[in-house]
Amino acid sequence: MPILDKVSQKMATKMASSEEEPLPKLPVPPLQQTLATYLKCMQHLVPQEQFRKSQAIVRRFGAPGGLGETLQQKLLERQQKTDNWVSEYWLHDMYLNNRLALPVNSSPALIFARQHFYDTNDQLRFAASLISGVLSYKALLDSHSIPTDCAKGQLSGQPLCMKQYYGLFSSYRLPGHTKDTLVAQKSSVMPEPEHVIVACRDQFFVLDVVINFRRLSEGDLFTQLRKIVKLASGEDQRLPPIGLLTTDGRSEWAAARTALVKDSTNRDSLDMIERSICLVCLDAPGGGDLSDTSRALQLLHGGGCSKNGANRWYDKSLQFVVGRDGTCGVVCEHSPFDGIVLVQCTEHLLAHMMQSSKKLVRADSVSELPAPRRLRWKCSPEIQSHLASSAEKLQQIVKNLDFTVYKFEGYGKTFIKKQKCSPDAFIQVALQLAFYRLHGRLVPTYESASIRRFREGRVDNIRSATAEALAFVRAVVDHKADIPDQEKLQLLRDAIRAQTEYTVMAITGMAIDNHLLALRELAWDLCKEPPEMFTDETYLMSNRFVLSTSQVPTTMEMFCCYGPVVPNGYGACYNPQAEAILFCVSSFHSCKETSSLEFAKAMEASLADMRNLCSAPQPAPGQPPATKEEGPRPRSGPLTLTSNHH
Ligand code: COA
């Protein structure tokens, strides 16, 4: 019995007890509190005149006996009736209603440390070990033996909701004409999936992982993968790169899928992919250098259709990429789970692989296992034309992404903790400073905050562009010379405090975004006309996140990245380590105002400024603060900007 399966049995007992206590339900924040916070979040981000108008709208909405109170009452009733009053609204708003293509716009990627594969066999051994890890992990999930996660950092120790884990290998995002559907396979209704789909040279193969009631060993999997590579190399058998269709806009893919399912061969092939455990993409070399940035791009969009862009099936929740050139990682369809769960699962798999790499896996020379089956596609001229259009749009996605991985090596969490600050809040303030440096203004910012302390909790938003952050960045950028450092340091501490307070508010279920979303959705049902509260320009603007940020920490050598969520925006994913902070910055070339490289440079300058402020000498009690010319100022240490501008 594999080690993990033994571990799983032991853990099953532990889990059973923790499952008896259901987590608390997500609270509904008081209406007036949310409205006041909303105004506070937006006041300094919009012109004064616009704010006054919005203030009046909010006042009417929240007036006694007004629409706000009616909706709040409906929401409280919904809270009683459901496990989580926001999860369904949130899933649709955040993912399923979004019509944009999944690569870059929605699906994040986790990039592993670069692997060194001497030959194709090495690549396939890695893939076999990974699949074997997936099967062991899935066995743990199936027996509900994954130990319950506990909150770390702020308000640590509380148990967290584990529901997302059960969507890792059993979900599929079905494209729809107006909205998608998240299909969750339930073992009681459907047979358990017992196959993985292997993509190789844009062809898809069914790799059965249980044959004659026996789970394939790593050696068996390796043998089967070798057969797949051989089958895929036969040029005469090559079929059109159907995976390209899944890279298109969701409505376009839905239209193509409607054409595809007219044929029963296609229906069977789709069915096999949709019911699979996951995809494993055996990629060809990406062709570029193997820097962090280049490898991340291979994962985010596959480099377009001439490279590995069609060697994907974006609707499937987990696509493990194992590239011949050592580019490896996971592309994830985000709707069933969040980054933290993905990292937990992946670190588990990598730990399993490290164990198994000690054994040398050999192929069976006379394998009696049936050869994996290639999925067949019948392509009508209509589908050919969809393919051509999807290919063209993928090229645009590839061309448009401006992406850079930047490792700040000046300091990390250790230094920040020594300042008695929350590292996450400190980094968020640095992001605000970087944005202000480049653009001279602050913008609605999204930072994901986990609400897994609550039943079926996913995330809410920490609005990091606080008024306190604005006061600080103005002091540093606009009043560089005329505000003493001690004053700037105080403004920095105020900004970090405000950020930390918002974080605590968000992770305890008191943030405003989910609340306003639920009120808005309830209003659609209740009102003939959309209420002014939700059509007001300030509200619309509050939901265009020009800066979309997320902390995705890892304990192993890997990092997460994703694209911006608006055309003029930045995606900024960061991984704080003890002595360094890794940033993945994305933006679009089509926007003339943004530049990922410039943003990375601005981050470097901002973190250096903040370190210098923290290290500035403190005035003796009763003494005036040191001015710029007075006290000695420590120089910033060696800050490396590993620029890989795309
Ligand atoms: N002084 C000294 N140390 C402090 C401190 C202070 N004032 N404040 C915090 N710390 C310590 C914490 O105790 C913690 O210590 P640890 O490293 O031993 O665990 C560490 O600093 C990190 O804490 P902090 O930086 O405050 O952040 P956090 O880990 O609590 O993270 C969020 C904050 C918002 C990122 C987190 O709550 C969260 O929600 N994460 C999920 C994000 C997510 O969903 N990402 C994926 C989206 S797809």
Image: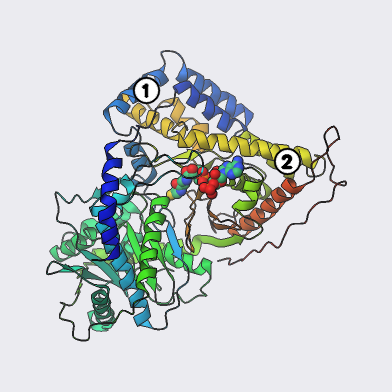
Residue placed under numbered mark 2 in the picture: 489
**Residue 502: percent from left, percent from top:** 54, 35
What is the residue that sits farthest to the left in this orientation?
212
Pointer 1 residue: 71
Q: Which of marks 2 and 1 precedes in the sequence?
A: 1
Asked if one can make out residue 170 in the rendered structure from this viewpoint, the answer is: no
The type of residue carrying mark 2 is Leu
Amino acid type, callout 1: Leu
Q: Is residue 265 left or right of residue 514?
A: left
> In the picture shown, does residue 292 fall above or below 25?
below
Q: In the image, residue 322 lies at what x, y percent?
A: 38, 71
- Other-residue count near label 1 (Cα within 10 Å), few / some / many at <14 / 14–19 / ≥20: many
Image position of 526 with respect to 321: above or below: above
Q: Is mark 1 within 8 Å of ligand 1?
A: no
Depth check, mark 1 against mark 2: the one in front is 2
Q: Quadrant of the N terminus?
A: bottom left
